[in-house]
Image (cartoon, rainbow, N blue to C red):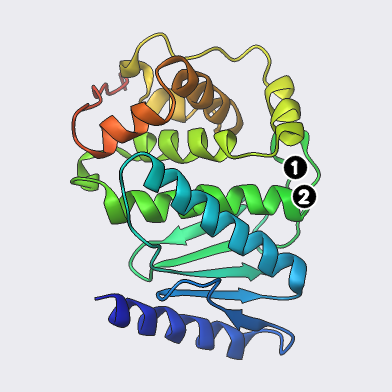
Amino acid sequence: MLIIASCLALGFAQTSIAQSSHNEQLSTCGYKAVVVIYRGTAELAAACDALNEVTAYFRAIGFEAAPVVSVEFADRPADDTGAHGYFDRPGARVVVYRAGAVRPWSLSWNLAVAASFLRHELVHAMVWRVGKEPNRLPREWHEFIAYAIQLDLMDPNILERVLASQADVQPFDELIAVNEFTYGMGPEAFAVAAYKTYRARGGAQLVRQLLAGKLVPPVSHPPH
């Protein structure tokens, strides 16, 4: 399975490189089923650090699984002004953009911020890899987990600025408040509320319970 996934990832990587700059290079960051597409040593270091940190996080809560994914730093498409990157689950592919006009939490877009969103997308990949029946988790709960861990692994100086930008945002009073409506209030506020709720409810142990199926999050649909 790992060999097949690695070959698929390598296929995606080679296709991406053929369609983009010849300056891009390949690495595995020491993982058998990982391909990293990068441009320069700073991007490679950021990708390897993100892979190592996310893998170590899941190992620490009892999910021992190496990542199976293609990771790519890419130039932002001309018609894309909002996204920071994405996780393509069928293709086992994570893409994070190098630059753009986006300013999440009023932060200037740079490699450190991009690497934070790379962790976010890698968390998505790992949740689908190690979680028990991840399909049962609504979209907003996948985002809750990804944002909570993204901020948990964030550089403390950047995290301080993120929290200051959303100082009025409070933790969710109850887990049922994690729903389509609160997710729709915007990713920046939702991310901070998710992180504060995560910290208030046991941190990594909350994630472990969710992924092991020991805690089934209550689902609430907002009125239409």
Query: In this picture, is 117 found above or below 189?
Result: below
Q: Secondary structure at mark 1?
A: loop
Q: Which residue: 74% across, 35% down?
A: 158
Residue farthest right in this picture: 108
Which residue type carries mark 1?
Arg
Sequence-wise, the earlier of marks 2 and 1 is: 1
Disc nearest the viewer among 2 and 1: 2
Q: Secondary structure at mark 2?
A: loop
Q: Which residue: 50% across, 14% down?
A: 171
Query: In this picture, is 212 found above or below 74?
Result: above
- Please state if 95 lies on the left or on the right of 180 as rendered: right
Say which mark, if any, is on residue 103: 1
Q: How many marks?
A: 2
Q: Which residue: 37% across, 40% down?
A: 142
| 184 or 195, nearer to the observer | 195
Name the quadrant containing residue 20: bottom right
Query: In this picture, is 221 found above or below 66?
Result: above
- Contact, CB < 8 Å: mark 2 with mark 1? yes
Say which mark, if any, is on residue 109: 2
Q: Which residue: 41% across, 24% down?
A: 181
Which residue type carries mark 2?
Trp
